[in-house]
Structure formats: C-alpha cells, structure tokens
C-alpha cells in the first residue's frame, strides 16, 4: 500500500470515528495497522474507538501494545488512562496520567484526566489542584476549564467560576461546547441571572446526557395557547418535576397536560392545577404542541423578579391526616431525609450521612421521623439514636408521595438534604430547613439563606472547610432555644459560616410548633 493510500485510509478511519460510526472506524484503523503495525496515531484511534464501543479489554490490549512501542506518547498514555478508568482500575489510571503530565507539562489534557480520576476517588482537593494546574498550562483544554469552573461554582466561588467558564467557552470546540455552556448556565443561575441562565441552559440538549423528548409535535414558543393543548414533558428527575410544575400550572388559555415520573402522578393530579397529569413511559396523549419542563422559565420569560413563589401549589387530601396523626403519636416531630440521587451535570451526590443528624436527636422531647426512600434507609439501623421509619406503612407505589405529604403536615419542621423531599415541602408550604453543600444548588436560588422559589424554606450551607456536623450543631442550638421559648438565635448565633448560617429564617420559615403541647 502506498503512503498516499495509507493516509487516505487513516483519514477515512478518523472521519468514521468523528461521525460516531465506530465499527467502521475499527475496521479502517485495523486495516491501517495491518499495513503499518507501529503507526501510533492508528493504535491510539483504534484503542479509543474500542473503548467507546464498550470493548474495554480489547482497548486496553491495543493501547498497552502502543505504549510498549511508543512509551513517550502522551496521546496513548491518556487514552490508556481513560480505558483503565472505565475498567475501574483508578490507581493504575492515575499513574498513567501523572506520567503523561511529566512528559508534557504544558499540555492540559493529562491533568484534566487526573482531576476526574481524583474526583472519582473522593479526593476533591487533589482534583481541583490538578485542574488548576491544567488551567495554568500553555494549552488548557476546554474540558479542564469546564470541570474547574464546576468545582469553583460548587465551592460557592461564583464570580471566579464565571471567569473560568467564559474561558472554557472560548476554548471549546464542537465536542466540548455544550458541556461548557451548560456549566456556564448553571453558574449564571446560581448568581441570580435567571433569564440569561435559562437561555444558556438550552445547551443541555447537545450534551448527549439527556434523551430526546421530542414527540414529533410543534414546539411551543410561549405564545398564547388560544384553546390549544400543550404537552409539558418532565425531564431530569422528581425534584425538578415538583419545582417547575408550578410553571405548567400557571399557563392559561388552553389545556395543559403534564407528563411526570409515575410516583408523582397522584399528588400532582390531586392539585387540580392542570388539565391532566400522565405518567412517563405511557402512551402520549393528543396535543397540539409541546415543551420540555425546564424550558418553561425561558418560554414564560421568568427572571429574578418574576419567579412565581405562591405556595402551596400542592395539597394532600385532608381526610388522610387522621390515621397518620394516630400513627405518629403526640409531641413535636421533625421530618428528615438525607439522601437523594446525583443531579445531572453535577458529579456529586445529594447526600448527607444520617449519623451527622445526631445533634437533632439530642434536642429534648423531639422525635425524628424518616421520610427517606430507597437505598439510604439502611443507615437507620446503623445510627445510635432513634429514628421512626414509617415508610413500611406508606404506600411505596405510585401514591408514596401522597403519604409523605400527609406526614409532613403532622411535623413541625422538615430538615433535609438536597432531595425531592425539600421540593415537596416547599410546594406544600411546610417549614423546611434544607442543608446544602458549600455552593448550594441553583434550584433553590442564589441568596445565602432564602430560597427564591420557596418562601417557607431556609437554606443552610455547609461552611467552607467545615463539616456537616457543624451545620447540625447549629440547627440543634436553634431548636433547643425554640423549645425553651427563647428567640430563634439565628440572627445572633456564632454560626460556623458567615454564608447561609448567620441570618434569621425568612418569611417566618421556622418550625410550626416545637413547644410540645
């Protein structure tokens, strides 16, 4: 095969990989290597294509051969590190990424890979240090800048995150642009730039992380419905469905059909705020146009001054209260939840160890009531303090959230991590203290303690460099003061953080009644 023919075959392989025709790319790369077995770019391309096909063992073997023949190839070392990451061999992947960085200190790619590996290992500080090294290199990648901007935003450094993410957008190519723009959108939303942030957030559809929801109907443009039927399709999860349902419920001039996660259908239907609520996964109803749920703020032209905060917009059936009142018994009760899922685009779970709730259990005369669902419930048996778990008595099927809403009505206060429970409490206008990580979460708003979306909610953030226990010690001191009939000390308490823990609860968002009467 002539050199010209070989180069043409290699270009064909690259083009197939770029168009995600990975099987064709594998065939073409193998053909190149059959003619020139030591050609490093083809070994690299074949290894990457195999990994993207999920053929990790084959990818590892190809790349190991490539590294044996080209031990100084940064491209091969990075590709092998990513393959070993997919295989779960994180320590070996770290070694390869560090070697690649030592060979090319001005190349930001090895540090970007190393940062991702360190984050997966739970070493957030080392991950950020690696990203800062990558960002300061002569050739920082958009991926590294995007990841650094995300970590800065999660640490509450919003202005710095915006600068870094602006750099990421400028450096991004076609493959990296959507991720950079989505992270910049989230930083905007965390900064109170609601209108601009939701416009930018439309880039989420180009990340490949969301399934297409397009039902083949014309997209709604926000114009008057004029008697038409609008299908609003939920996306991302139950928290978002609970939070943004209010926007669908406020659309007038036609019929609104809301497609929701099945577990939420009964409680959303009970609100009687939209024409119909249908479960995800079922047959789609007839409609004239459609919109994805998190596009409604943009379509309705919501900004920081027009966020609809009229609560409650969900209500449980009052006839269900009496049985639960008898089950839960007398005295003041605090409902708690500690574990949610991993929100899209965040790479960190919404969870707090139940053990860190211990100071609440020490508040005299108060009972802790678990509203935790799913995998986190096993922690109840591992803590040395009592938590009443009524979830076995709840309907764990489609009506589970109705029971949860009723139990909330019987509790003086909800204290929860960033979970769907927080959004349900806010939608029900229940007093709720939501415990957030340092940088908070854009879904609750940008104010240090108040939620822009939920008037009866107070946001309590983990102090920078502090622990979750610091937050719960602070909460316990406040609850003890309230139990003793003293003023809520939030405005004067020497809180462990100046951001989010030193101001009084807004809008009278304290407990309903902790007096014990």
Image (cartoon, helix red, strand yellow):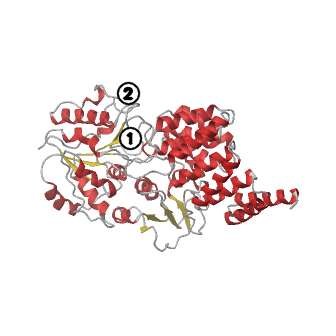
Is there any visible trace of residue 284 in the rendered image?
yes
Label 2 Cα crowd, 10 Å radius (few <14 / some 14-19 / many 20+)? few
Q: Could you say which is closer to the camera, residue 492 or residue 366?
A: 366
Q: Could you say which is closer to the camera, residue 383 or residue 269?
A: 383
Pinpoint residue 423: horizontal percent, then vertical percent.
37, 51
Q: Is residue 367 left or right of residue 10?
A: left
Q: Image height check: is 112 above or below 466?
A: below
Which residue is found at the position 48% from the left and 74% from the top? 283
Q: Is residue 251 left or right of residue 28?
A: left
Q: Image height check: is 287 above or below 472?
A: below
Split into 4 quadrants, where in the image is the C terminus?
Answer: top left
Q: Earlier in the sequence, mark 1 or mark 2?
A: 1
Pinpoint residue 333: horizontal percent, then vertical percent.
19, 47
Q: Image height check: is 306 above or below 162?
A: below
How many labels were placed on the picture?
A: 2
Q: Which labelled disc corresponds to residue 359? A: none
Residue receiving disc 1 = 436
Quick one: which residue is furthest to the front in this view?
68
Mark 2 falls on what kind of element? loop
Cα separation between marks 1 and 2: 14 Å
Residue receiving disc 2 = 498
Q: Is residue 515 left or right of residue 376?
A: left
Is there any visible trace of residue 415 in the rendered image?
no
């Amino acid at each position: 095969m002539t050199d010209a023919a070989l180069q043409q075959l290699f270009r064909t392989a690259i083009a197939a990989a770029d168009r995600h025709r990975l099987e064709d790319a594998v065939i073409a790369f193998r053909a190149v290597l059959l003619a020139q077995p030591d050609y490093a770019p083809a070994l690299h391309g074949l290894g990457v294509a195999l990994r993207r096909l999920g053929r990790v063992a084959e990818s590892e073997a190809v790349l190991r051969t490539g590294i044996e023949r080209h031990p100084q190839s940064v491209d091969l070392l990075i590709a092998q590190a990513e393959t070993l990451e997919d295989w779960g061999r994180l320590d070996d992947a770290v070694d390869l990424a560090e070697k690649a960085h030592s060979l090319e200190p001005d190349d930001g790619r090895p540090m970007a890979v190393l940062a991702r590996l360190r984050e997966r290992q739970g070493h957030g500080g080392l991950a950020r240090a690696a990203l800062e090294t990558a960002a300061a290199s002569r050739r920082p990648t958009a991926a590294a800048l995007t990841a650094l901007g995300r970590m800065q935003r999660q640490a509450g450094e919003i202005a710095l995150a915006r600068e870094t993410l602006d750099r990421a957008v400028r450096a991004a190519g076609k493959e990296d642009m959507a991720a950079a723009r989505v992270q910049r959108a989230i930083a905007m939303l965390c900064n109170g730039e609601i209108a601009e942030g939701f416009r930018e957030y439309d880039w989420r559809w180009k990340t490949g992380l969301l399934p297409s929801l397009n039902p083949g109907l014309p997209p709604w443009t926000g114009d008057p419905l004029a008697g038409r039927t609008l299908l609003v399709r939920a996306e991302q999860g139950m928290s978002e469905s609970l939070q943004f349902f209010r926007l669908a419920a406020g659309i007038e001039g036609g019929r609104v059909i809301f497609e929701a996660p099945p577990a939420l259908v009964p409680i959303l239907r009970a609100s009687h705020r939209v024409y119909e609520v249908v479960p995800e996964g079922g047959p789609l109803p007839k409609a004239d146009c459609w919109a994805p749920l998190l596009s409604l703020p943009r379509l309705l032209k919501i900004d920081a001054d027009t966020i609809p905060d009229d609560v409650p917009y969900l209500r449980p059936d009052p006839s269900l209260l009496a049985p639960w009142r008898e089950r839960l018994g007398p005295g003041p009760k605090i409902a708690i939840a500690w574990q949610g899922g991993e929100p899209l685009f965040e790479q960190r779970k919404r969870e707090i160890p139940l053990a860190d709730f211990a100071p609440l259990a020490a508040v005299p005369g108060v009972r802790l009531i678990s509203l935790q669902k799913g995998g986190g419930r096993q922690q109840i048996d591992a803590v040395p303090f009592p938590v009443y778990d009524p979830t076995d008595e709840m309907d764990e099927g489609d009506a589970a959230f109705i029971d949860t809403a009723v139990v909330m009505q019987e509790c003086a206060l909800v204290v929860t991590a960033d979970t769907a429970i927080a959004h349900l409490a806010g939608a029900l206008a229940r007093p709720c203290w939501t415990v957030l990580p340092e940088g908070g979460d854009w879904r609750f708003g940008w104010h240090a303690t108040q939620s822009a979306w939920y008037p009866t909610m107070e946001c309590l953030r983990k102090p920078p460099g502090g622990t979750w226990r610091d937050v719960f010690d602070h909460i316990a001191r406040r609850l003890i003061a309230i139990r003793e009939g003293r003023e809520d000390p939030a405005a004067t308490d020497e809180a462990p953080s100046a951001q989010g823990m030193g101001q009084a609860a807004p809008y009278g968002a304290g407990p309903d009644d902790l007096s014990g009467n």
